[in-house]
Amino acid sequence: MSDQRQHPRYAIELDVEVIVDGVAVAGRTHDISRGGFCMLGRSPVAVPATGEVRLALVFSETEFSEHLSLPGSTVWCTPMKGQYQIGVKFSNLDAQSRGYLDLFIKFLDGGDEGEDETE
């Protein structure tokens, strides 16, 4: 069976908060792509729902990068071992938000490593 995803996924634990219908659910990502992410949260979220997501790199238990805030939509929410696995897609990204997300993903992909800058 092959994976038919539109964007490559990066297995990474990011600090995340999903805010829909005025309710914030905090957790950690399982993976992320340019299209969205999968996370584990402490409580369920409404599905489908549109809101805001806030992502941050985790440097240590108490140190995080600045949050990247983007519009997103919940697409599924499944109970899992006392938590909830939540699928979120990025939606209605303007050019600036898309640029920030691309920089974020580029960092996860190793930055400029491997790019050919010869003429």
Image (cartoon, rainbow, N blue to C red):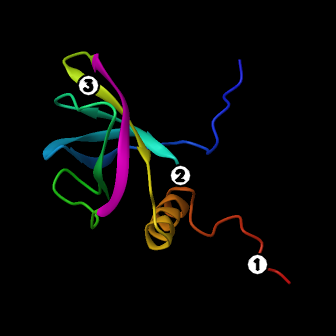
| Residue at the disc numbered 2 | 34
Sequence order check, earlier mark of 3 and 1: 3
Front-most of 25 and 32? 25
Place of residue 98 in the rendered image (x, y in percent of width and height, measured from the top left): 49, 65
For disc 1, the neighbor class at 10 Å (few under 14, some 14 to 19, many from 20) is few
Query: At 52% from the left edge and 47% from the top edge, which residue is drawn?
Result: 35
| Residue at the disc numbered 3 | 84
How far apart marks 3 and 2 lie (CA) works out to 22 Å
What element does badge 2 sit on? loop
Q: Which mark is residue 117?
A: 1
Quadrant where the N terminus is found in the figure: top right
Sequence order check, earlier mark of 2 and 1: 2
Query: Magenta region: which residues?
Result: 68-79
For disc 3, the neighbor class at 10 Å (few under 14, some 14 to 19, many from 20) is some
Q: Is residue 99 above or below residue 110?
A: below
User: Type of residue at label 1?
Assistant: Glu
Q: Quadrant of residue 117?
A: bottom right
State which mark lies toward you, 3 or 1. 3
How far apart marks 2 and 1 lie (CA) works out to 24 Å
- Left or right: where does residue 115 sit relative to residue 17? right
Sequence order check, earlier mark of 3 and 2: 2
Q: Which mark is residue 67?
A: none
What element does badge 3 sit on? strand
Q: Is residue 49 above or below residue 109?
A: above
